[in-house]
Image (cartoon, rainbow, N blue to C red):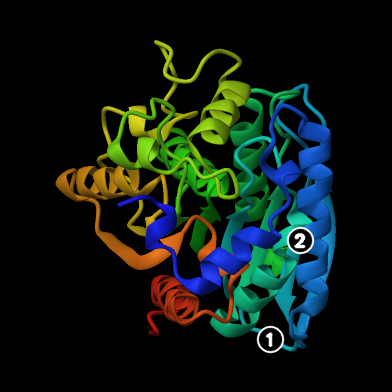
Amino acid sequence: MRFEDRLDEAHLALLETIPAEMLDLSDVPTARATLAGRAEAMKEQAPEIPGVEIEDHHIPGPDGDPDVMVRVYTPSGVDAPMPGFLWIHGGGMVLGNVAMDDVKCKAAAASVGCVVASVEYRLAPENPHPAPVEDCFAGLQWFASNAGSLGVDPARIAIGGGSAGGGLAAALALLARDRGVDIIHQQLIFPMLDDRNITRSSHYVQHPKVWNRETNLAGWSALLGKPAGSEDVSPYAAPARADDLSGLAPAFIIVGDLDLFLDEDIEYAGRLAAAGVPTELHVMPGAVHGTSVLLPDHPVSKRWQAIEMGALKHALTGGG
């Protein structure tokens, strides 16, 4: 059955509203501006989330590189140290910014009761690998080193991200393990993990109004500075390339069954579990890439959001 034939009316209507320019990576500046405009419009329509303070910090970047902006979201009026959650935005490695996830980060801070730090990492193609993941690692190091002044319990720090941010979070989990930085959880939301694009789902999703095979190959090639699927790709760029997944932080992965990342995410979850990493996997029927963000009032999105926030709360506080 064709991809389009499996979409419900709400998704079909959504796709009609997606500007073609937003996913046209032949013109990255226009795609960035289009996505930023749409994200800002969605943010203006979202309900207010009171009781969360926001502060931007400019921290030292990797050696010899520019400073990195980290936006911190802190629940108001809490004196005891709280768990911390480092979040990484999506955008196919070439698009997006911290601001587009303000609502999500405020909601996580308020509902889970944690301090959220969101990293403004450098984007490809201007800044190919390893710049994005090294910026994220700089953010994690700063978050952990300054936990006390930020009101964070350094023994309860998790990382996570969506789409490209999910892939960067998975890569960051590998870096944290290999460089001796402790994290307790990795929250991977429809993560972008494998540059090879050889799975069934990576071929199946080619609709121009969702993140599709063409845009995915372009995003990976921009990050790598060479064609996606090339030899000698670092697992810190494409985590699915990692040979050893043992010793990683417990993982939560959620993906829609109409997402081109479906198969690679399922495979990665299975490999994590086989390596002895506690792993929770959810496949949401009828969801495309970004359903939970683009259609927040859809029934599948409400289930998704409850599962996602429940998993984060359980990981950070033991609550469900």
Q: Position of residue 195 (x, y in %)?
A: 44, 28
Q: Position of residue 17 (x, y in %)?
A: 70, 61
Q: Is the residue marked by circle 1 packed among few (<14), some (14-19), or many (20+) residues within 10 Å? A: few
Q: Is the residue marked by circle 2 packed among few (<14), some (14-19), or many (20+) residues within 10 Å? A: many
Chain-order first, disc 1 or disc 2: 2
- Tag nearer the camera, 1 or 2: 2
Q: Is residue 305 above or below residue 88?
A: below
Q: Secondary structure at mark 2?
A: helix
Where does label 1 land, which residue? 78
Give the amino acid at mark 1.
Val
In the foreground, 66 or 43:
43
Q: Is residue 28 above or below residue 19?
A: above
Name the outermost residue toward the left. Answer: 274
The numbered mark at residue 133 is: none
CA gap, disc 1 to disc 2?
30 Å
- Which quadrant is home to the C terminus? bottom left
Quarter of the image for residue 71 reads: bottom right
Which residue appears at 55% of the width and 45% of the height? 211
Q: Is residue 175 above or below residue 156?
A: above
Where does label 2 land, which residue? 39
Which residue appears at 40% of the width and 76% of the height? 307
Q: Position of residue 308 (x, y in %)?
A: 45, 72
Give the amino acid at mark 2.
Ala
Q: Is residue 36 left or right of residue 226?
A: right
Q: Secondary structure at mark 1?
A: loop
